[in-house]
């Protein structure tokens, strides 16, 4: 085992340890250190914020070096948003979004 392998394995071990400590802190000390009500209210939005941070950059019509470009994914996402606002059905959002994406790609040829 060379120095590079030791570095990689120690980085994986330390990152796993950091993840374990930060995630288990609430389970171990949760009863002794209760969170303020304002923090608990703010944490309700964490899953939505994380999902938005992952999904939205994929839909933005901007490519490095090219600037704004037309993107079929953005149109399909906007159609999905409209369907969700009208029906509140996650299944319909997926179906309409995917059909729109496939249809636009097919039309583009």
Image (cartoon, helix red, strand yellow):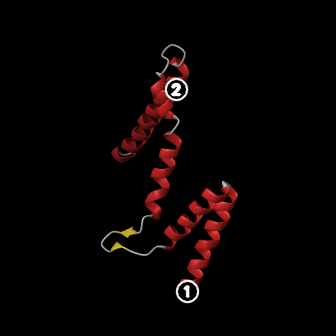
Quadrant (top left/top right/bottom left/bottom right) for the C terminus: bottom right
Q: CA distance from mark 1 to mark 2?
A: 51 Å
Residue at x-position 61% and y-position 66%: 97
SS for tag 1? Answer: loop
- Tell me where residue 43 appears, x and y as whole percent: 49, 34
Residue 87 horizontal/vertical position (percent): 67, 57
Q: Quadrant of residue 81?
A: bottom right
42 or 50: nearer the viewer? 42
Would residue 21 be seen by someone viewing this image from the given angle? no
The numbered dot on residue 52 is none
Task: Name the foreground residue: 94 vs 87.
Answer: 87
State which mark lies toward you, 1 or 2: 1
Q: Which mark is residue 24?
A: 2
Label 2 Cα neighbours within 10 Å, binned few <14 / some 14-19 / many ≥20: few
Label 2: which secondary element: helix
Residue 81, compared with residue 33, is above or below; it is below
Vertical arrangement, residue 37 with respect to residue 62, above or below: above
Task: Determine whether, in the image, residue 80 is placed left or right of residue 92.
Answer: left
63 displayed left or right of 34:
left
**Measured along the vertical axis of the image, is residue 93 above or below residue 36?**
below
Tags 1 and 2 touching, CB below 8 Å: no
Query: Is residue 66 among what the camera can see?
Result: yes
User: How many numbered discs sit on the rendered protein?
Assistant: 2
30 is higher (above) or lower (below) than 67: above
The residue at 55%/15% (across/down) is 31
Q: Position of residue 107 (x, y in %)?
A: 57, 84
Q: Nearer the viewer, residue 83 or 94?
A: 83
Left or right? Give the position of 41 relative to 87. left
Q: Earlier in the sequence, mark 1 or mark 2?
A: 2
* Disc 1: which residue: 109
């Amino acid at each position: 085992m060379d120095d590079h392998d030791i570095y990689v394995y120690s980085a994986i071990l330390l990152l796993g340890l950091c993840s374990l400590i930060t995630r288990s802190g609430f389970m171990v000390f949760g009863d002794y250190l209760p969170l303020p009500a304002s923090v608990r209210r703010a944490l309700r939005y964490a899953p939505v914020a994380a999902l938005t941070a992952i999904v939205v950059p994929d839909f933005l019509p901007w490519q490095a070096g090219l600037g704004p470009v037309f993107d079929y994914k953005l149109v399909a996402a906007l159609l999905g948003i409209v369907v969700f606002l009208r029906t509140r059905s996650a299944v319909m959002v997926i179906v309409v979004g995917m059909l729109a994406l496939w249809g636009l790609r097919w039309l583009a040829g």
